Image (tube, rainbow, N blue to C red):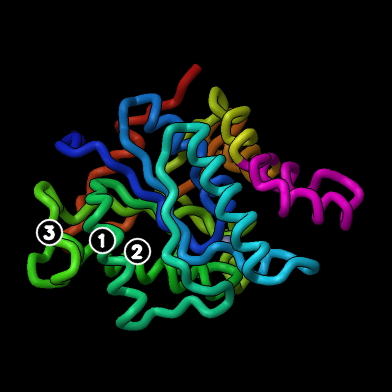
Amino acid sequence: MASQQPERKTALAFLAHPDDAEFLCAGTLIRLRDAGWEVHIATATPGDCGSATQDRWEISAVRTKEARRAASLIGATYHCLDERDIFVVFDKPTLKKAIDLFRRVCPSLVFTHAAKDYMMDHEMVSLLARAASFAYAIPNVSHDVPRPAGAVVPYLYYCDPFEGVDPYGNPSNPTTLIDITAVYDRKAEMLACHASQREWLRAHHGMDEYMEAMRRHAASRGKLAGALYAEGFVQHRGHSYPHDDLLSHLLPPRN
Ligand SMILES: [Zn+2]
């Protein structure tokens, strides 16, 4: 089926932690920006457990600054729901925050975590993104942020689970592979903004494992896509969500 381009060209990556977007979908976000899309990156938490030496307030300040800087490299806007690492839940107040974020951004294309992933923050955000995608255009769903003009049920794509396997060790099977070879260096530059995470891993491993882990995964998806580097996604195709593979249509392989 031919893909209809949505009227609004606004993409939202809603993920759990600062640096998740850079690992999982930044190459695709860069290609969308280059194609004229507005891009937003949101995290549920400010990454408050991402340090063994700084308290939660210090590390949150550092990591949100890193995330904002990474987003700014591609002209994207960074948002944070200000939940807490490990304690992200699917409940009424958190879903309300997610819906209000969606109403402010008004996305026509959403990226989130795989439904099954290695940690529960990711799975909870996946549920929140799915529910907020379905609900945000409903007029009465929130009285705090008015329904934006042009709100629709957006295209929804799940990023790969960590290392491409679910918590039971089964490999995920992407419905969509996006060639990111030409923009890989820019994706790496975004990830390198997260110096607080890169440095402790480098000290621990004695090598640049942070950057290497991303390269390994992008190369393994590249193999499936017939490219040097790629990102993999599973499209949500439930009732009321757009079914055609917009991403493959918008971002064909590049030579
Ligand atoms: Zn994460």
Tell me where residue 81 sits by quadrant: bottom left
Neighbour tally class for label 2: few under 14, some 14-19, many 20 plus, Cα within 10 Å: many
Of badges 3 and 2, the one in the foreground is: 3
Q: Is ligand 1 less than 8 Å from the beta carbon at label 3? A: no
Q: Earlier in the sequence, mark 3 or mark 2?
A: 2
Amino acid carrying label 3: it is: Arg
Please state the horizontal and vertical placement of residue 29, each as a whole percent of the image: 43, 38
Identify the residue under disc 3. Answer: 147
Q: Earlier in the sequence, mark 3 or mark 1?
A: 1
Check if mark 1's residue and mark 2's residue have beta carbons within 8 Å: yes
Q: Residue furthest top?
A: 255
Task: Give the total of numbered labels.
Answer: 3
Quadrant including the N terminus: top left
For marks 3 and 1, give the CA distance: 13 Å
Neighbour tally class for label 1: few under 14, some 14-19, many 20 plus, Cα within 10 Å: many
Identify the residue under disc 1. Answer: 133
